[in-house]
Image: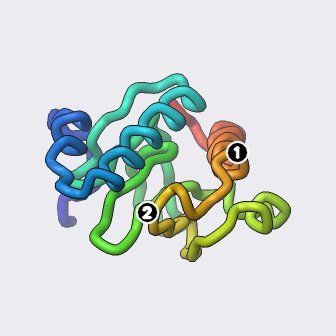
Amino acid sequence: MAEMKTKPMETSPADFINQIKDDRKRDDCNELVAVMSNITGKPAKMWGPSIVGFGKYRYRYATGREGEAPMTGFSPRRQNLTLYLGPGLDNNALLAKLGKYKRGQGCLYIRKLDDVDRLALRDLIRKSVDEMRKRYECE
């Protein structure tokens, strides 16, 4: 079986974020670190080469495949900030308040934090983390 790319790394999240050339995106990433670490009570940790994650959970698929992943996190992609929120994206009332975003399965794509209501975003992250803790074995 292939080795998972998305695993905890020793790279410093601060060093990773400081390498982002776009000032706005770098500031948005630093803000997300503060928000996500406050909500989870966990420090930022690199997962693979480009995901800043917080906490971790164990998953097991029906196929028997299992592993670990960050409880929540984000990645500063070229076009968007990708936020990994899992079950928190089921909250349509908060999504209606959020502002400009795109959505994937378990992911929220935001061009910049100024495009969204920050309180609604915090609530989405909090609800996602709470739901992750109910459903999975989280650390």
Q: Residue at x 61, y 71 (%)?
A: 100
Residue 94 drawn at (x, y percent): 78, 58
Tag 1's secondary structure?
Answer: helix
The quadrant the N terminus occupies is: bottom left
Q: Residue at x 61, y 43 (%)?
A: 136
The colour scheme applied to this rendered structure is rainbow
Q: In the image as oriented, which residue stretches furthest toward the right?
A: 93
Camera-nearest residue between 36 and 64: 36
Taking 38 as reference, is 46 left or right?
Answer: left
Callout 2 touching callout 1 (CB < 8 Å) = no
Residue under numbered circle 1: 119
Comparing 11 with 123, the one in front is 123
54 or 132, nearer to the observer? 54
At label 2, the amino acid type is Thr
Q: State the image coordinates of residue 86 (x, y, percent, origin top left).
A: 59, 58
Neighbourhood count class around disc 2 (C-alpha, 10 Å): few under 14, some 14–19, many 20 upward: many
Q: Is residue 15 left or right of residue 40?
A: left
**Residue at image location 57% in from the left, 64% down from the top:** 115
Q: Which SS class for mark 2?
A: strand
Q: Tell me the CA gap for discs 2 and 1.
A: 18 Å
Q: Amino acid at mark 1?
A: Leu
The x and y percentages for residue 103 are 58, 74
Residue that appears at 20% across and 40% down: 9
Q: Nearer the viewer, mark 2 or mark 1?
A: 1
Q: Which residue is mark 2?
A: 82
Q: Of marks 2 and 1, which one's residue comes earlier in the chain?
A: 2
Q: Is residue 64 left or right of residue 125?
A: left
In the picture shown, does residue 39 fall above or below 51?
Answer: above
Q: How many marks?
A: 2
